[in-house]
Image: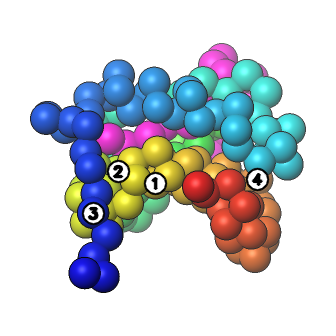
Amino acid sequence: MDRQRIVMHYTVSPSAEDLEAIAVNIWDSLPGELLTHCEDVALLVEDMADDITMDDLDLDDPYELLALYKNGKEISPGVEMTVANDDDVLVLYRRAILDMWCETGDDLQNLLRQVLIEELGRYFDFPDEDIEEMADRYIA
């Protein structure tokens, strides 16, 4: 049989706390070229993107947004305050990630690592080829 078997260790969907714990465990194993830009970045897991974020990014479907890097100076994407009042935050959107996990059947840790690499790479203006190379190098 040419079919790959996937063994899940969850009897219920992973919670926000579960995803945060997985992301924290993955964080130190991300590519060094990304981590050099990520001093004092907080990880936050939210269920779904809110309406304001959806409007700011001009998205129709909240399942399109897996993660969003928010600069501590940003009021909304592209609009910055003159003085930062918060640390930078990388927000992971739980339901969109779980939807993709169910859709692809990929290992959840590998999927989450891919999401982290792609969002950080895009935010810090890495070329698509470099992001793809980092993902290939760091996805188990």
The kind of residue tagged 3 is Arg
Q: Magenta includes 93?
A: yes
Residue segment shown in magenta = 78-94
Alpha-carbon distance for marks 2 and 3?
A: 20 Å
Q: Residues within 10 Å of mark 1 (few under 14, many from 20)?
A: some
The residue at 51%/33% (across/down) is 23
Whether label 2 touches label 1, CB < 8 Å? yes
- What x and y, as percent, mark residue 107? 40, 53
- Disc 3 designates what residue? 5
Kindly identify which numbered label has been placed on residue 97: 2
Element under disc 3: loop
Kindly identify which numbered label has been placed on residue 111: 1
Question: Which mark is nearer the camera, 4 or 1?
Answer: 1
Whether label 3 touches label 4, CB < 8 Å? no
- Disc 4 designates what residue? 124
**Most extreme residue toward the left, as rendered?**
11
Q: Is residue 134 visible?
A: yes
